[in-house]
Image (cartoon, rainbow, N blue to C red):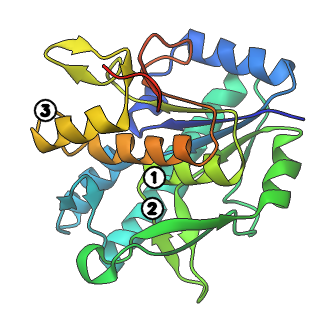
Amino acid sequence: MTQTIVIKIGGNATNNLSETFYQQLADWHQAGKQILIVHGGGPQISEWSTKLHLPVSKINGIRVTGPETLKVTQAVLLGLVQPLLCQHLANHHLPAMSLNAAGVPAIQGDYLDQAVYGEVGQVTGVNRNYINQVLDRKIGVCAPLAVAENGKLLNVNGDVAAAGIARLLSAEKLVLLTDVPGVIVADHVVDQLTQTTAKRLFKAKVIKAGMQPKITAAFDALKNGVKEVAITNELKYSGTSLTKQVTI
């Protein structure tokens, strides 16, 4: 059975990906693994929202998304971040294809809580046949935009989207690539993290809002069949592995 790897990268990371990152992608692709990259664009969305005098607000790390902010989000993700990422992959001789560009909804979703977050979604399904067809030949690149049953587009937190997609694709591995080397507690990277420990660190406000949805999403993926989950700043990671077995 073909193994699938889902990688989430943030908006800032698209311009700062290392040669090690591209080499690892090449190695995995040559080994016949399916690779799907889910990219965010948070800093760029905030920057353009500010320029357009739109409110920039997050609740527990989730961006509050009104109708105008949703338009900015779509424009930034599909018009700026994704083309740049695909160009970087092409420059490294990696065959990439946008899953958002074919007019086929790759991700299905529903409102997270419209009264609280606005046009924000959660992943309820994926077009598995379409995604597998793409990943059999190319590295898939996907923005975290889900399509609701009524056809409306919804903004999904990138980490939440990546974890949901990994779960629904029965992925072997989920890597949440970030700009820090892992989950940091008391100035050092935690090697392994359990859900029980994570909840305790949330409650004590040791782990801040930006990392919380990342960790919550990662444990959701782990609980639902993804075999290996890591939060790190490199694909060949020595970051934080999430586990249900090991207590720290």
Q: Nearer the viewer, mark 3 or mark 1?
A: 3
Q: Residue at x 27, y 32 (%)?
A: 197
Q: Are marks 3 and 1 in contact (CB under 8 Å)?
A: no
Q: Earlier in the sequence, mark 2 or mark 3?
A: 2
Q: Residue at x 39, y 19 (%)?
A: 192
Tell me how far mark 1 sits from mark 2, CA to CA: 7 Å
**Residue, disc 3:** 206
Mark 3 surroundings: few (<14), some (14-19) or many (≥20) residues within 10 A:
few
Mark 1 surroundings: few (<14), some (14-19) or many (≥20) residues within 10 A:
many
Position of 11 compared to 93: left or right? left
SS at mark 2?
Answer: loop
Q: Residue most toward the left?
A: 204
Q: Residue at x 31, y 22 (%)?
A: 180
Residue type at mark 1 is Val
Position of 187 compared to 153: left or right? left
Q: What x and y, as percent, mark residue 137?
A: 88, 38
- Residue 79 visible? The answer is no
**Residue, disc 2:** 156
Residue 186 against residue 8 in the figure, above or below: above
Q: What x and y, as percent, mark residue 168?
A: 67, 55
Mark 2 surroundings: few (<14), some (14-19) or many (≥20) residues within 10 A:
many
Position of 113 compared to 206: left or right? right
Q: Are marks 1 and 2 in contact (CB under 8 Å)?
A: yes
SS at mark 1?
Answer: helix
Asked where in the image residue 19 lies, by quadrant, the reply is top right
Residue type at mark 2 is Val
Tell me how far mark 2 sits from mark 3, CA to CA: 25 Å
Q: Residue most toward the bottom?
A: 150
**Residue, disc 1:** 160
Residue 224 against residue 193 in the figure, above or below: below
SS at mark 3?
Answer: loop
